[in-house]
Image (cartoon, coloured by chain):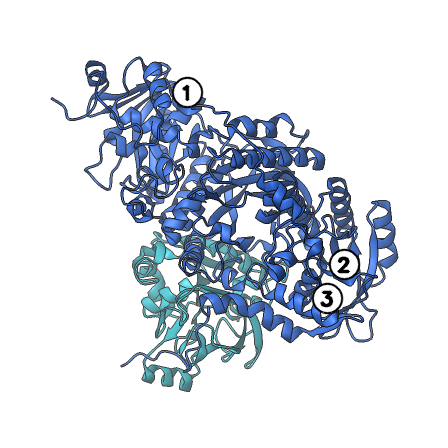
Chain colours: A blue, B cyan
Amino acid sequence: MSLVDTVARAAAEADLPQPFAELGLTRDEYEKIVATLGRRPTGAELALYSVMWSEHCSYKSSKVHLRQFAATAPPSRALLAGIGHNAGVVDIGQGYAVTFKIESHNHPSYVEPHQGAATGVGGIVRDILAMGARPVAVMDALRFGPADAPDTGRVLPGVVSGISFYGNCLGLPNIGGELDFDPSYAGNPLVNALCVGVMRHGDLQVAAASGAGNQVILFGSTTGPDGVGGASVLASATFGEAASDGTASAKRPSVQVGDPFLEKLLVECCLELFAGGLVTGIQDLGAAGVACATTELAAAGTGGMLVRLDAVPLRDASLGPPEILMSESQERMMAVVEPGRVEEFLAVCAKWDVRAAVIGEVTDTGRLVMTWHGETVVDIPPASAADGPVYRRPLARPASQDVLAAGDPAALPRPADGAGLRADLLALLGSPGLADKSWVTDQYDRYVRGDTVLAMPDDAGLLRVDETTGLGIALATDGNGRYCRLDPYLGTQLALSEAYRNVAATGARPLAVTNCLNFGSPTDPAVMWQFAEAVRGLADGCAALGVPVTGGNVSFYNQTGTVAIHPTPVVGVLGVHDDVRRRVGIGFPASVDGAAPVGLVLLGRTEPEFGGSAWAHVCHGHLGGRPPVPDLDAERRLAALLAAAVADDLLSAAHDLSDGGLAVALAESCLRGGTGCTVRLPDDPFTTLFSESAARAVVAVRPGGETAFGQLAGAHGVPAAAIGSTGGDSLTVDGCFAIRLAELAAVHTRTLPALFGPVVRDPGVQGPVLSS
Amino acid sequence: MRIGVITFPGSLDDRDAARAVRLAGAEPVGLWHGDRGLSGVDAVILPGGFSYGDYLRCGAIARFAPVMAELVPAARSGLPVLGICNGFQILCEAHLLPGALTRNAGLRFITRDLPLRVENASTAWTRAYSGGDQIVVPLKSGEGAYAADAGTLADLEASGQVVIRYAGDNPNGSAAAIAGVCNAEGNVVGLMPHPEHAVDPLTGPSADGLGFFASVVAAVAA
């Protein structure tokens, strides 16, 4: 008798107890599977349903909320493919389309920082590739526990080295992202990876298995035991819950290992397959591996598929059907190919040294059937696994919100004089969240492919798409857990506003939105309330700004014990730049001797808004009150003004105002440009310097363009105040303080190397000499 | 004029090298690692990247690619050859250039715009510069520390085979701050920094790197 749990055996041995709870399924979910199948599931079917119905794959707790994105999406002519695809696709003109998406790899990056972060990059790149696009850049939004916590010293360098290892070896420029620290992320770092790809209209690929008789080909890496249970166990349960000894180490084998070299070959191989018209359907393998790819392809296509699991190339011959289905081995893709094109398909794979195996075919039975050496081990309606359960979890606004709101930062002591303002600015500039991030970004290749026009520390990444016309795209990600903790609805709109403004600051027009929603446990009504508020805030914000959400990702269970992270929606905004040759960065231009000074203009309205501010956080360790009030109409007008001013070549620099307000923005622009500035501020310099009111930017106006810019600002209804000019070697606030650039630079750059070690070790000698 | 750019599995900056060739006024010709010929090109560039993943020693596998069986004798006969970053590592592994590239002193990958000094402006790839010129070009590598035995280093200095040197801080612990070297004849040059990423101020820190490509165009035309 066979040792394998077959469909026949499942029917015959109906009462066999099954480990559904260990696989993360509830009794109700298990019974739903039994009812769907009319019998108990086989071991392979149970494995398949358990990963497909995990929170990570099924979005079972978030789906009812995420529907708002499509329901309230503003009309957009730019959207070629929206939510529900691997990634959204946006028309940027001149026959080009762009696809982009951000995804979390939080839990694996805590368990094994290097590989966890590396495979996060690999996974999102395959999502973009599966749309038919060439991946052209990546970004990373990172959040860690306190910068000086010992565990941060383990997690952060590992995450950065993993992103560096994978992205650099894959040949994708890393053009930006975020780095922040907060005690709420201790034990739950956030590693959100974004990828963007470019294609021509008409290159769009579909993730569907259509046409009975078409062949199903698995190609790329072999399948091993890595990540077995990763999707359901790692991403869907709090650490310690399922580990017998209560430690995270029990789950270490679940983390996948990445091979960026193979991914590079897979990218080139896929693009050649697409160009040759050899593919009718394609799906990347990510969480839930073969289980997810086969069910989703089948459910989206003709409806049936026959898969011979014993044809899957293995790197560990001991794997059986459940492990093969759940394996999260990296660098794999699944294609649907017409029988007459299989030979050509395999020849392209051979050219790129990519292993490929025909493992099945599309059928018209409406069933997903899988065999193992001739015996049937899976026989299910694919939609039942692909669609998954839907939960409307209870939600409740926690009483702690009122306590937080009552802690008004207006009561905090403010600096009494210029020396106090100066000290607070230096404290902010040297704080880990605002310090110079070269320690991180110097480990990433921003140059490869030769189209990077702007990258960190500029406000947004800017890529050239067409060398002849100068058409390009800008991308920024933003999130602020402190704002969202105070008010998840407004905080999410502020994240959207900031990313939108960052894209606009380069001169690009914002077009579309992706998001990665990082939250605690959905079984906690307070977390679910935060989540619902954040989604509602983002949907309303996108409607007001006229930019649709094209896709995204949800990461729940970011909590330790009963303590959840700050709600942290990370919002990515994509914009189109008509001519990247006219871009502006954040660096102030030096004044030329004898020439007219370069004037600085503060755009937008500044109110005393300090709730959740960097000043309250860094200078007082305070979190309370209300976050700044987003003004989406003002954001729209500001973005339109910046695009128009850049198009008219009126600006030589632009920097959005956000964490740390005008003070930090001025310091960053001085350091980036290598020139000082002198500003005169109205009555209340403290508020003007450190408030974090939204919809603001500081710009450097080209000499001679002041009048035209002033008229343009007036026409757009954007308040514009001339506050000073660039030049000198100090950041000077008239009547308050002056700080030399050398001191600013020292304070700004020393923090991360002091915490995590120098990037460039001074060998003290001229270097190694081999003994002869 | 036709200049070949070899693509190994894992080459990444091949597209950038081809663009630089085009900007210098020559025609870039893609060469494949499995090719048994050089398509009659006038010069060859081995671009940056991670050939074969560099999971062994950088460049150690690429050295055995079929195209290298054609390239090595051609280089020994005077064909201008430039190795950038991974290409430099491959040229060292193939013994077309002396020395080796080892792990950065800081043990981390570094991307940085660096001042470089042109020490030898008479090679096929640097004749558009003047000796002592300072240029700004990005470095981006994890294993860029140049190493050689003391005798070789002394020979390189004496014979003018040190072509490019780091002009500011030594970023990776390279021996004698060496960023690039050439063979005795000066037709084969390798360097760790990436001149192909400094051909247009829009996308690089300068256009200072264009001189490498302009040099070979002049050298071949001469």
Q: In this view, does A625 lie above or below B96?
A: above
Label 2 sits on what residue type? Thr
Looking at the image, can residue A105 be seen? no
What kind of residue is marked 1? Answer: Ala
Q: Report the chain holding disc 2.
A: A
How far from the left and from the top, in percent, is residue A224?
27, 41
Looking at the rendering, which quadrant does residue A338 occupy? top left
- Quick one: A323 or A540, which is closer to the camera? A540
Mark nearest the camera among 2 and 3 is 2
The mark that comes first in sequence, 1 or 3, is 1
Labelled disc at residue A589: 3
User: SS of the residue at dot 3?
Assistant: loop
Query: Which label sits on residue A688?
Result: 2
Mark 2 or mark 3, earlier in chain: 3
Residue B182 against residue A756 in the figure, above or below: below
Mark 2 on the same chain as mark 3? yes
Q: Which residue is label 1 attached to?
A: A383
Residue A523, image x, y percentages:
46, 33
Q: What amino acid is labelled 3 in the image?
A: Pro
Residue A288 appears in which quarter of the rendering?
top left
Given residues A81 and A64, the one toward you in this image is A64
Q: In this view, does A701 lie above or below A576?
A: below
The residue marked by circle 3 belongs to what chain?
A: A
Placement of the C terminus of chain A among the 4 image quadrants:
bottom left
Chain assignment, label 1? A
Q: Could you tell me how far apart the alpha carbons at marks 2 and 3 are, in whole angstroms?
A: 23 Å
Closer mark to the observer between disc 2 and disc 1: 2
Is residue A433 visible in the rendered structure shown here?
A: yes
